[in-house]
Image (cartoon, grey):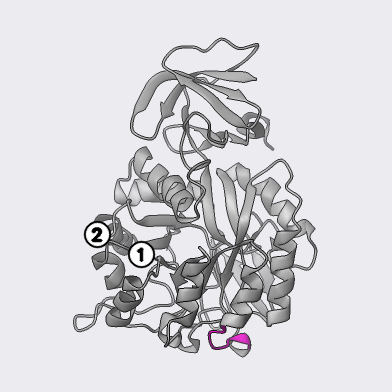
Amino acid sequence: MYAIHNIVVYLENEMIERGSVLVEGTKIKQVARENIPAETVVDGKGYILVPGMIDGHIHGAHGTDVMDEDPGALQTMSKKLPKEGTTSFLATTITSPTEQLDQAVERVQNFQQPEGAELLGAHIEGPFINVKKKGAQPESCIIDPDVQQARRWANTGVVKAMTFAPELDQDRALLNFLNEHQIVSSAGHTDADFAQVKDSVAHGLKQLTHLCNAMNGVHHRDVGAVGAAMLLPEVKAEIIADRIHVSDEMLQILFETVTPERLIMITDAMRAKGMADGEYPLGDQTVTVANGKATLADGTLAGSVLTMDQAARNMIDICGASVADVIQMASVNPAKMYNVYDRKGSISEGKDADFLLIDERYRIQATYCRGVNVYDASHSN
């Protein structure tokens, strides 16, 4: 048991300007406005304590990828992600042959959790997507929605989200299946128009995958999937705030129209995150990373090298987001979306001790995952 003193604490509905937090085992035991006595005391040095961030859409990082056959890839991600403030994540697949996707899901199922970011489960991105909006997803592996295949993945119990093109799911069989099995249904790599998205949302579609990217944007005669995110309060939307996937001006528009209540910050990062510029494999394709931008040979964006803390700073600098706004987009919304808000996503007694110490610029000073200090900037190389 230990206590962290001398900190600004962001709770679910208020901020404590000078408080302390007591941690017992993996849980937050107490939050107080005064110093809590404890055998071990950590000086918070006046830093801000906020919930850890949850990345619900990440393919890889630090030279590893979710599709790698080596199960150590997921271990590496878990250990490295806390440096950027990520305390939980969904291992996200790329469109691939179904047997490779089966194996990726099996690796998630068999994952042995180290001290690091918690692997909450898998996000299946593709293969049930629209070839017209494939982006960097391999066209040769794209297939029509298949409920029987989805059932095989769902039966593992680890699939938490699936990105698909709802306009191809004409009888809504896949959407209904996902809703019945509490798997987050997310429209992405889709050619759906506004009416089709609206209809899907009315039948339980939960979110839009990397808003603006690989979907129809706003046009004055059809506001498309992006307009649907702005107009339909029932749906949430992922956003890649790297200043590459979405322009600064569009990010501002989305911040003001979709609002922090419905935006979910993600990285969509690939294996080059945390690595030097150069060439990296993405399935059978080659991605070139230069100046923070990852592209295929034809210039198509191929994921990102974004970190969650940089995304937070971008939202603050571009949109004027507050710390509370970032918490909403990076912690609260994904925790609620992936049904773990009972134990993650906010600073509250009884929840997992997943939290960050940050400065006023959202620079990570320390990261705690389930009570363990897994990253300390003062000891980092």
- Horizontal side of 261 relative to 129 (left or right) equals left
Which comes sooner in the sequence, label 2 or label 1? 1
The answer to if 144 sits in the magenta stretch is: yes
Give the quarter of the figure containing the C terminus: top right
Query: What range of the chain is rendered magenta?
Result: 141-146
Residue at the (32%, 45%) spot, across then down? 321
The answer to if 335 sits in the magenta stretch is: no
Against 31, is 71 above or below? Answer: below
Label 1, residues with CA under 10 Å away: few <14, some 14-19, many ≥20: few
Mark 1 = which residue?
247
- Horizontal side of 168 relative to 223 (left or right) equals right
- Residue 67 visible within the image: no
Q: Could you tell me residue 22's position as x and y percent?
A: 55, 21
Q: Could you tell me residue 260's position as x and y percent?
A: 33, 51
Mark 2 = which residue?
257
Against 11, is 277 above or below? Answer: below
Residue at the (58%, 78%) spot, across then down? 296
- Residue 204 visible within the image: yes
- Horizontal side of 257 relative to 77 (left or right) equals left
Label 2, residues with CA under 10 Å away: few <14, some 14-19, many ≥20: some
* Label 2 to label 1: alpha-carbon separation: 15 Å
Give the quarter of the figure containing the N terminus: top right
Amino acid type at circle 1 is Ser
- Horizontal side of 211 relative to 352 (left or right) equals left
Q: Main secondary structure of the magenta part?
A: loop
Q: Nearer the viewer, residue 244 or 356?
A: 356
Amino acid type at circle 2 is Thr
Q: Could you tell me residue 20's position as x and y percent?
A: 49, 19
Q: Place residue 273 in its image quadrant.
A: bottom right
For mark 1, give the secondary structure.
Answer: loop
Q: Which mark is residue 363?
A: none
